[in-house]
Amino acid sequence: MAKANEMASEAAAEILTESDEEAQLNKAIEELRGVLKDDAQPAMPGLAAGGAPAAGSSVIMNIPVEVQIVLGGAEMPVSDLMALQKGSTVALNRRIGEPVDVMVNGRKIARGEITVLENDPSRFGVKLTEIIGAKA
């Protein structure tokens, strides 16, 4: 019965219209902004890290962060690693179509799917499908 409910939920999710998907994506983006703002809040109101007075939020919003998209990974013995050469293929631990992880400063914040950019078909990006909530 639980499996049937799970399959029904998956089928219902696939039936969502594009406007529903866009609304969900916008909601997810707002949740992501909230997570990032929560992380940026100082421990004491009015004080930044180190006890300095907090400047405007524009200062925080201009701090560069490292964003990485993790397609997958692999483990192999050093001997196999040393045998790699031009043309070698490394099998990853994920399959085609599985979501990729979106990492910010080494922390997983979202998952998404690889997509081709509409305005530049020679490049690709990631369409966010899930925002990972902050852990309390």
Image (cartoon, helix red, strand yellow):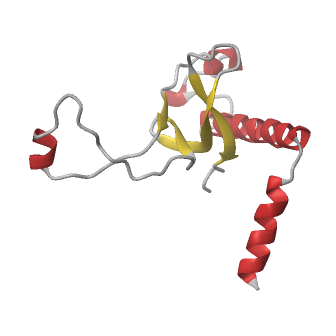
Residue 114 seen in render: yes
Q: Quadrant of residue 61?
A: top right
Residue 56 seen in render: no
Q: Nearer the viewer, residue 87 or 29?
A: 87
Residue at 16% from the left image edge and 32% from the top image edge? 85
How many discs appear? 0
Residue at 24% from the left image edge and 31% from the top image edge? 87
Q: Residue furthest bottom?
A: 1
Q: Quadrant of residue 114?
A: top right
**Where residue 120 sits: x, y (%)?**
64, 13
Q: Residue furthest front?
A: 87
Which quadrant would the N terminus be assigned to in this image?
bottom right
Position of residue 69 in the picture relative to residue 112 (left or right): left
**Where residue 89 sits: x, y (%)?**
28, 40
Q: Quadrant of residue 82?
A: top left
**Where residue 115 sits: x, y (%)?**
63, 31
Q: Nearer the viewer, residue 62 or 19?
A: 19
Which quadrant would the C terminus be assigned to in this image?
bottom right
Position of residue 7 in the picture relative to residue 100 (left or right): right
Above-or-below relation of 11 to 79: below
**Where residue 134 sits: x, y (%)?**
63, 50
Residue at 33% from the left image edge and 47% from the top image edge? 91
Residue at 70% from the left image edge and 19% from the top image edge? 118
